[in-house]
Amino acid sequence: MVNAERFAKGMTSEQYVRFAATPENLAREGSRGPRKDFSGYLRTAYDAARLSPAHEAAWTWLVAQPGGPARVLAISEEWSSDCRRDIPVLAKLADTVGLDLRIFTRDGKTNGRGPRPEPDSPNADLMAQFLNERDGQTFQSIPVIVFYAKDFAPLYRYTEFPAVYRKDRIRAVLDDAGFMEMLGSPFFEVWRSAALAEWTSLLYERLRVGSLA
């Protein structure tokens, strides 16, 4: 389980963006060839992110509830388009409503392509807790975003992409050029908004019903 000491070892959103540009990070293995410096993208996406009045009011209600969300743990790698989609809006949300956000990298020097964390990963203990289980297999899917109450009681975990973004079906019919074009299209922003809506809705359900089905 995540405790205060382990949580505190994560990066703030500003530290994460700065880390993305460091030689240390850029020397780590990416998904396809050398890493790129995505720090500028992350800053621009954060600056552009906006919470609608409804979302801001909803989150003001959520964080005010007894046992409501107070802390957020994220596991991310900036080469991942899913992480670049969700982490900036998560950081804007955290700053807007006062959530304590800490971000952890998934990988060490090598890319975590296997079903379980690589031995060189400094955060293998965290990734092992949040593996994506599907059809009898495990995957190191990212981002992982976990919302906690102030006392670290877990409330809700989100993995990889919102339910309405049926990425595997879309990716299956797009070549690399088509997928990259999609990432620059308005649909990428639609799914960024969908992620925020999913977090908001399921945390409301968790607090109202007491559990998630």
Image (spheres, rainbow, N blue to C red):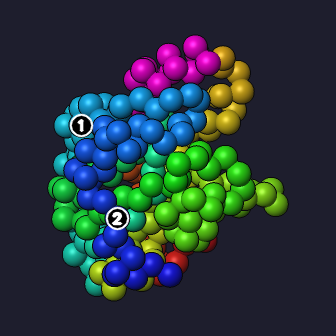
Instruction: Find numbered disc 1 in the image and state the secondary structure of the residue it sits on.
Output: helix
Q: Residue at the spot x=67%, y=46% of the render?
A: 113
Residue at 46 percent of width and 32 percent of height: 35
Q: Quadrant of the C terminus?
A: bottom right
Observer-nearest of 23 and 186: 23
Look at the numbered disc 2 and give the secondary structure of its residue.
loop
Which amino acid type corresponds to the residue marked 1 in the rendered image?
Arg
| Part of the protein shown in magenta | 176-194
Numbered circle sitting on residue 204 = none
Q: Is residue 104 visible?
A: yes
Which residue is identified by label 2? 10
Where in the figure is residue 168, as x and y percent of width and height?
67, 36
Residue 63 percent coordinates (x, y): 25, 71
Image: 95 above or below 203: above
Residue under numbered circle 1: 43
Q: CA distance from mark 2 to mark 1?
A: 19 Å
Dot 2 or dot 1: first in sequence order is 2
From the viewer's side, name the closer residue of 85 and 69: 85
- Crowding at dot 2, Cα within 10 Å, few <14 / some 14-19 / many 20+, comes out as some
Closest to the camera, between mark 2 and mark 1, is 2
Side (left or right) of 69 relative to 75: left
The quadrant where residue 105 appears: bottom left
Q: State the residue at coordinates (61%, 68%).
A: 128
Residue type at mark 2? Gly
> Quadrant location of residue 60?
bottom left
Q: Considering the whole magenta stretch, tell me its main secondary structure.
A: helix
Against 65, residue 52 (above or below) is above
Is any atom of residue 88 visible in this view? no
